[in-house]
Amino acid sequence: MKNLSIASTVLMAVYTIFLILADLRLFSVSAAFGHMSKSVTGWIIDGADLSVIAGALSVSVSVLILIFAVVFLFFCITCVVLTAISYWLIRRKKYKADAWMKIIVFGFALAGCLKLVSFWISILLILPVVLSVIVVFGKK
């Protein structure tokens, strides 16, 4: 039980690191669009000056990506806290409580990924759930 709990917690930590890297990428993309809005000049096509439209669109995209990145940041912070709680529960030898927490957390994440994101990401999220179910229903 201990090894399965540790394995699923390590997977949780790896997923958290990937989420943080993805969030940093979102912030950098938002900054790039914000920088582009300041440097859009001279977009003239068929006598029409499109620099104002291009600048406004890049500002809008920058703000939308920034809002998504901030929401995603709260999700990343939650994952870091849950990983710390998982390590704490394992240290206290409360493997079933840790497993139930992972089943709930990864269950909601799995449901969201199946509906919104990707089947392949969902496959990655199934592994900690399976390990946690084995811990909960397995024999000592």
Image (cartoon, rainbow, N blue to C red):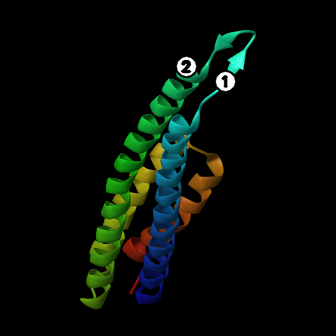
Compare residues 91 and 47 and report the one nearer the observer: 47
User: How far from the left and from the top, in percent, is residue 31?
Assistant: 48, 48
Compare residues 26 and 8 and report the one nearer the observer: 26
x 34%, y 58%: residue: 104
Quarter of the picture containing the N terminus is: bottom left
Above or below, 53 against 129 in this view is above
**Outermost top residue:** 47
Quarter of the picture containing the C terminus is: bottom left
Which image quarter: residue 79? bottom left
Residue at disc 1, secondary structure:
loop
Above or below, 127 against 27 in this view is below
x 55%, y 66%: residue: 127
x 49%, y 68%: residue: 128
**Outermost left residue:** 92
Residue 100 seen in the figure: no
Q: Left or right of 18: which side holds 107? A: left
User: How far from the left and from the top, in percent, is residue 81?
Assistant: 29, 69
Of the residues tagged 1 and 2, which is closer to the observer? 1
Identify the amino acid type marked 1: Trp
Residue 25 seen in the figure: yes
Above or below, 102 against 4 in this view is above
The image's mark for residue 68 is: none
Identify the amino acid type marked 2: Ile
Residue carrying label 1 = 43
Above or below, 105 against 14 in this view is above
The image's mark for residue 53 is: 2
Tag 1 near tag 2, CB within 8 Å: yes
**Sequence-first tag of 1 and 2:** 1
User: How far from the left and from the top, in percent, is residue 120?
Assistant: 65, 53
